[in-house]
Amino acid sequence: MPTPTAEAPATAKATTAIALDSVSKIYGSFAALRNVSTTFASGSCTMILGENGAGKSTLLRAAAGLITPTRGKVSIFSQPPSQQRHRVAYMSHAPMLYDELTAMENLTYFAALHRGDACACVGSPEMALRAVGLDPHLTRPVGQYSQGMRQRTSLARVLQTDPEILLLDEPFSNLDVSSAVHMVELLADFLTWPLPGGGSRTILLTTHLASLAEPITTHTLHMRAGQIIQPPTEAAR
Amino acid sequence: MKPFLKYFSHVLIHLRKDLRLEWRSRDAINGMLFFALLVVVVFGLAFDPTGFPTTTRQISGGILWVAILFASITALNQSWNREQRNQVLEAQRMAPSPASALFLGKAIANMLFVLLIEAVLAPIFVIFFNLHPLGDTRLFALILPLGTWALVVNGTFFTALGLRARNRELLLPLLLLPISLPALLAMVQSTTGVLTGELDALQIHSWISQLAGYDIIFTTVCLLLFETVLNAE
C-alpha cells in the first residue's frame, strides 16, 4: 500500500511528526483500523473525515499511544508514543476533567503533572482559561458547567501543556457556532506559537463539521471502514 | 529536581487531588462509615459483651477487621470511578508522570480515609463490646496502619485491574479476599493477642513482622505492575 503523507507547508521543515506503519487495530472480530500507513509532517494541520465507525478516533488514539496496535507501528518523532508524552496532547469529546473540581483546580493539577525536566515550557492555567474565554476565578465545579464550557476547559487543559502535537477528537461537538469559530481561531493561533527548540506545531483533528475547521486545515484525509480511502491531500486555502 | 523528589512531588499532587475530591463529595467516607458502624452495631447486638468478656475479647479482633475490610471494599470499589468518568484516566495516561505515582497517591488517600474511619470506629467498638484490652495497646499503633495498608494497597490495585471488567464490583472481593488471607490472619491474630493478652510480646511481634513483610512484598509488586494494568486494553 502506498504511504500517503501530509506534507507541511513549504516554509517549514518537513520532519515527520507522526508516522503510522501498517497499523491495524482489531477488537474481537471487528477491525477498527486496517493496515493504515501514513505520515503527518510537522507543521501540518490535518483534518480526518469519515462517517461514524470509520476509524478516525482509533487512528487518533493510536497516535496518542492510548491504544496499542494489533499489528504495525506508530511513532512520534521516530520514537514510540510512550516516550514522547510530553510533546503530545490529546483532547477527546469527553472532557477528561474531574467534575468535582473547578476549572482552575483541574488545570493546575494537570499542569503540575506536566511540569518537569522533559517539558520545556508549561503555560499558565489562568492564561489558558482566559484564552478559551473562561473566567479562571469561577468557583463552580466543572460538573456544573454547560457542555460547551467543559469543552473549552478541556481545550485549555491541552493548550496549557504547550504541546508540539495536538490531537483533537471531535473538538467542536457540543459547541455553538460562535464558540466553535473562537476555538478555530485559537487553534490557528496555536499553530503560530514558537517552539522553544524551533520547528512547527502539528494538529490532527477529526470532525464531522469540515467547514468549521477548513480555515486552519492544510490537509484533509478521508477514512472509511478502518482504511484511508483518500490520502492526506493539500487543502484548498 | 532529583528524580526521587520529583517522583514524590507527583505522588503528593495525586494525593492532594484525591483528598480534595473526597472532601467535596465525601462518597467514600460516608459509605464506609455507615457500613462499619452497621457491622459493629449488629455484632454488638448479637453478642452479650458483658456476660462473656473473655469470649468477647477473643472474637472482637476478628469483628473489628471484618468491619474494616468490608467498609474498605465499599470505598475501594469507588476509588477509580472518578477517573473513569469523563475519561480522566486517559488524560492521566497521556501525562508525562509515572503511573506508579498515580497509584501510590490514590493508595495513600484510601489509607487515610480508612484510618479516619478506624479512628471513629475504635471508641464506638470499645463501648459496644465493653472492651478492656489486657495486652499492650500501644501495639495497635503498628497493627492498624500495617493492616490497613495491606488491604488498601491490594484493593486499590485490584480495583484498577477490574476497571474494564463488566462485574468489577464483584471482582474486587473475589480477588482481594483470597490474596489478603495471610495479612488478615496476621491482623486478626495480633489484634486478638493484644486484646486478650494471651500472646506474649514475641508472638505478637512475629505477626506484626509478617504483616510488614506482606506489605513490603505487595506494595512492590503493585508499584511494578501498575503501569501495565493502567495501559491494559
Image (tube, helix red, strand yellow):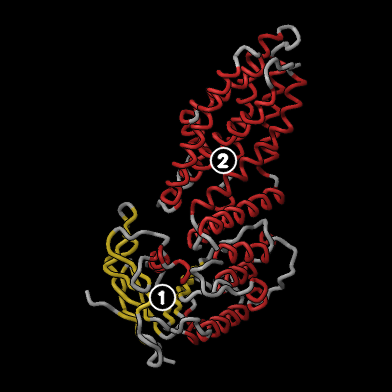
Disc 1 to disc 2, C-alpha distance: 38 Å
Classify mark 1: helix, strand or loop.
strand
Q: Between residues A41 and A153, which one lies in front from this camera angle? A: A41
The residue furthest top is B51
Q: In the picture shown, does residue B123 fall above or below A55? A: above
Secondary element at image label 2? helix
Disc assigned to residue A4 = none
The kind of residue on which mark 1 rests is Ile
**Is residue A136 depicted above or below B76 in this figure?**
below
State whether residue B174 is above or below residue A77. Answer: above
Outermost right residue: B127
The percent coordinates of residue A148 (x first, y second) are 63, 70
The residue where tag 1 is placed is A48
- For residue A181, which quarter of the picture? bottom right
Task: Evaluate whether residue A57 shows in this view.
Answer: no
The residue under the point 46% across, 78% down is: A203
Residue shown at 71%/51% (left/top)? B24
Please name the residue that numbered disc 2 is placed on: B77
User: What type is the residue that disc 2 sits on?
Assistant: Asn
Give left or right: position of B37 versus A14: right
Residue at 30% across / 65% down in the picture?
A73
Q: Residue furthest left?
A: A1
Contact (Cβ within 8 Å) of mark 1 with mark 2: no
The N terminus of chain B - image quarter: bottom right
Question: Compared to B149, does B108 lie above or below?
Answer: below
A18 left or right of B50?
left
Q: Chain of mark 2?
A: B
Q: Position of residue B9 (x, y in %)?
A: 59, 57
Q: Residue at x 49, y 54 (%)?
A: B99
